[in-house]
Amino acid sequence: MTKILNIEQLGKTYRSGTKEIPVLQDISFSIEEGETYSIVGPSGSGKTTLLGLCAGLDQPSSGSVYLCGSELSPMTEDARALLRNQKVGFVFQNFQLLPTLTALENVVVPMELQGLKNAAKAGMDLLDQVGLADRFHHYPSQLSGGEQQRVAVARAFSNNPSILFADEPTGNLDADTGEKIVELLFNLNKERGTTLVIVTHDLELAQKTQTILKLKGGRIAAKEKGFA
Amino acid sequence: MIEKNATSKASFSWLLKMALRDGKASGKKLSLFMASIVLGIAAVVSIQSFGVNLKENIALQSRSLMGTDYKIDSNDAPNERILAVLDSLGGADAREISFPSMVSFKGNEGTKLVQVRGIEGGFPFYGSIETNPPEAANRFMAEGGALLDATVMLQLNLKPGDSINIGEITIPISGSLVSIPGSTAVFSSVAPPVVLSYDLIEKTELVQMGSRVKYDFYFVADEELDLRKLRTDLRPILQQENYSIDTHVSSSERLGRRFDNFGKFLNLVAFIALLLGCVGIASAIHIYIKEKLKAVAILKCLGATKRQTFSIYLLQIAGIGLLGGVIGTVLGLVLQQLFPLFLGDLLPVDVEITFSTQVVFMGILLGVFMSVLFALYPLMNTLYVSPLQALRVDEGTSEKSRFAGLLVLLGIFVFIFLFSYWLLRDVRYSLAFVLGILITFSILAGVAHLFMRAIKRFFPTRWGFIARQSLLNLFRPQNQTLILILAIGVGTFLISTLYFTKDVLLAQASLESQANTPNIILLDVQSDQQQAVEALVLEKNLPVLENMPIVTMRLHAINEKTVNEMRRDTMRTIDRWLLNHEFRVSYRNELSISETIVNGEWNTAIADGGPVPISISDNLVRDAALEVGDDVYFNVQGVVLHTRVSSVREVDWSRAQMNFMVVFPEGVLEDAPQFRVITAQTPDAAASAQLQQAVVQEFPNVTIIDIRQILTVVEGILEKISWLINFMAFFSIFTGIIVLLGAVRTSKYQRIRESVLLRTLGAQSRQILKIAALEYFYLGVLGSLSGILLSLGGSQLLAWLVFETPFVPSWVPFLVLLPGITALVLVIGLSNSVSVLKSPPLEVLRREGV
């Protein structure tokens, strides 16, 4: 199996006035292609910061990140954006749909950025898969939380990513809706072979992944196998 | 593998599509931004387009305006040399003799100062004399009648067939004169024209010593004649005889330039409206982009580059600028049709409104350019948004480049300078304009900052909750204090400046109120008539204030250099007007109350055979480059008189009395041909009319100027102009209101959270409304008061430095503008809060998408 994400000696420090605050220290792990992976830990343990660094949204203070065979640190901001557009999908806790775009328009943005033709048709297919084909022209404010997250999932898979990062995907949803979203994510992971990396508080959800990485105080506390 | 320098290749059409999609959903928020541009552009386009149309119409109708191809004229009767020049041109096709005179009407008590025009030949050759009845224009010469100005006919209730007394003749009025080429409306208001046959002039016996008679010779030119060359060739020859030549081309250019200056002033007023709109653009985009930063972070997460996200919003703003430019241009083109209604007969021609492509292009381009330029600074924020913001991580937003910010600011000032230079064509004025804008904006911004600091520093912690909360709103993060004070302040500044400037102008023109100053001037009184005229004035129980001798003379030489030598000298330092000027000189041994000696000595002692000591006014020092001790030679009707400057006087020309540039001592000019000027004061219009009637009956050659009537004319003209200025200023006010609406509306989204939170915690609607009302009241009062005080200071400077007159400012801005604008701010602000308060908190949050 090929490593799709490889993290070596990763560290991140923020500056607060003259003081340096370490958020992540000495993080090393790797994820295989098609694997499901979860990062868990208490609030302030550095989960989201780690996700941001893994996806190339931020620059580390030390160490390196290899995503889809490319080392992120030497890449320009534009090159990292292109990598995200071609290889990475995102699902956020608060959905993060563009409020001025309809459901379909939100889904097709990553495809249009790639310059793909027939993006609208592919977008409709994806909305159909998440059960929202009839709501394609609705704006996010006209959809419920669960529906918004389904649109976000459809958007996350629209560029056919190699790896999908999900940040607390059920955090803003009720239990039933959260369950459905998780099911959707895992189904699409199976169907498309997409690597799935989930950041969560929810240990029950983490147990559904193949590997669980536990963070505490910005360091790796444990790495366990899940039930998957 | 992705190359480390690779970049996304989304096409321009995708950027455009995204800009459209987002713009469609944000239409409501962007509509006010567009309105700011629309009004500013409409103001500039309407003035520009009307100016172009006016200039074109003047050029097209130049022959009809003058009535001829070219004319040769002077205040001197033609001598042998002039007659020879006229013969060499094939003889004049028509001639005219004109002079101001008093006239009276048979069977009517009225008298009037008019411009008598005796016309011979087929003048006008172009255009026509418009009369009522129309056929009067063709028959007045044959029937020996006169055409009298239509307004005078109406004022004095005269009709065709009535008689008019002009000097020693009484002739019938053939019809009322509506218009005649060569007469301007402004001059006609002071001395309306009376047209009669040239042959009748001699019989009036009004052309006497000292009469201000003008001789015109009109010519029709062949098509191929180069009028510019003819003017250049003949001018030096004619100038030697105090004659001048004027062609229809140069005349229309001169007229165009005169209206150009007024147009430039209006353009600046319009430009200020546009700049105010730009403040609105910057403020609206600042808040708009702030709301879009989350979306920018999401787009960056999905793989959009910073250039792409920047371009999406840049295209959106440029698109709205384009749309605003188009709508503003169309509105401006429509509005210019109203200008002739405001200006009426101040316009020299009937303006046919057409659309200039240059102006249309300018309007649209200006809309796009100004929108982008003023949106650039807030738009730059999109470049520095980290995609991490989509992940609940607040860290990572890098600082906006200070250098780039300064560059944008510099670009804005360079643009303002270049555009004002394009309007004014003068570097100094443009720099002064930019500096003025900078100072005004800086002072208003300074007031806003000081206000916020003062509240912070001296915060009244013991005040009640509502009062404290309303003050807190003024300096909390994302407050609107600066932008609202700027918008309210600039709008109020403009309007009150218009009021104050009108006060300054009227203060300068207002002569009547001064005690013991003459309001009646009797001109052209012959020496042998002076005692009888004085007696007549006294007989009416009116005081004779002054009785001054006037001797006419021309400059012959200065310090041995003759006028002809000076005419040929291209390096001369003397102003050209002096070389042909007919000086009206008086002699006396005392200074008048409007004069002060500023250099040399007031000398009345005449040495035998030596030069005559004279006193000159300070403007002559400047225009003739004269100093105390310089020798000046005057030609006094054929006799050359040697004089020497002994003193320089500062003269208050604004006083309503006869002032002179050159004053001789007594004992020199007594025997020279001369006439007198007598001034008097009448208590009211009736006494003035009685005096005028008596003088006209007994001394028809005497001209009477009633200063009261002139003041009425000046006020009339100011009234018309101020209508137009007010109209233009309303663009600024409306733009100001839109900026205000925009600022209040954009702040709405920040307030909703706060209001909803307060309501959730149990605050009543009344309390929340009171907080908002107090906040807008503070802003309204401070903004409008700053604007009024700023304009008061500016107008005071204008009065001191430019008009040199004290002025009493009008109370209108304080009594009307201050409460009016504050109330407007209050209404707009509160209407914004009411919609938030009417609905339950959760519904509001959901509807507004907070």
Image (cartoon, coloured by chain):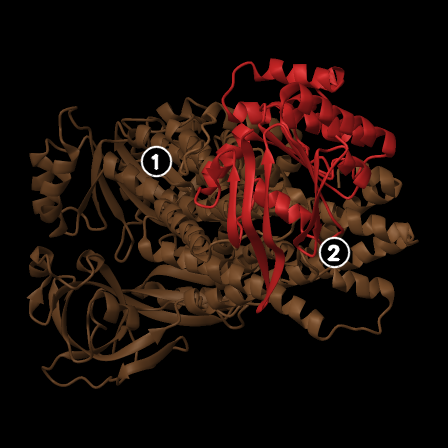
Chain colours: A red, B brown
Give the residue at x 40% y 75%. Answer: B594
Q: Name the residue under label 2.
A: B776
Q: Earlier in the sequence, mark 1 or mark 2?
A: 1
Residue B100 percent across, percent down from the top left: 36, 49
Assign the C terminus of chain B to one quadrant of the image. top right
Kindly indicate whether the residue at mark 2 contacts the one at mark 1 (C-beta within 8 angstroms). no
Mark closer to the observer (1, 2): 2
> Residue B196 got which mark?
1
Give the residue at x 65% y 59%. Answer: B783
Q: Which amino acid lies under the numbered mark 1 shown in the image of this protein?
A: Leu
Give the residue at x 32% y 81%. Answer: B597
Give the residue at x 34% y 35%. Answer: B196
Q: Which amino acid lies under the numbered mark 2 shown in the image of this protein?
A: Tyr
Q: What element carries label 1?
A: strand
Residue B721 visible here: no
Image position of A201 (left or right of B647): right
- Up/down of B171 relative to B536, above or below: above
Using the image as rendered, state which of residue B518 and residue B674 is in the foreground.
B518
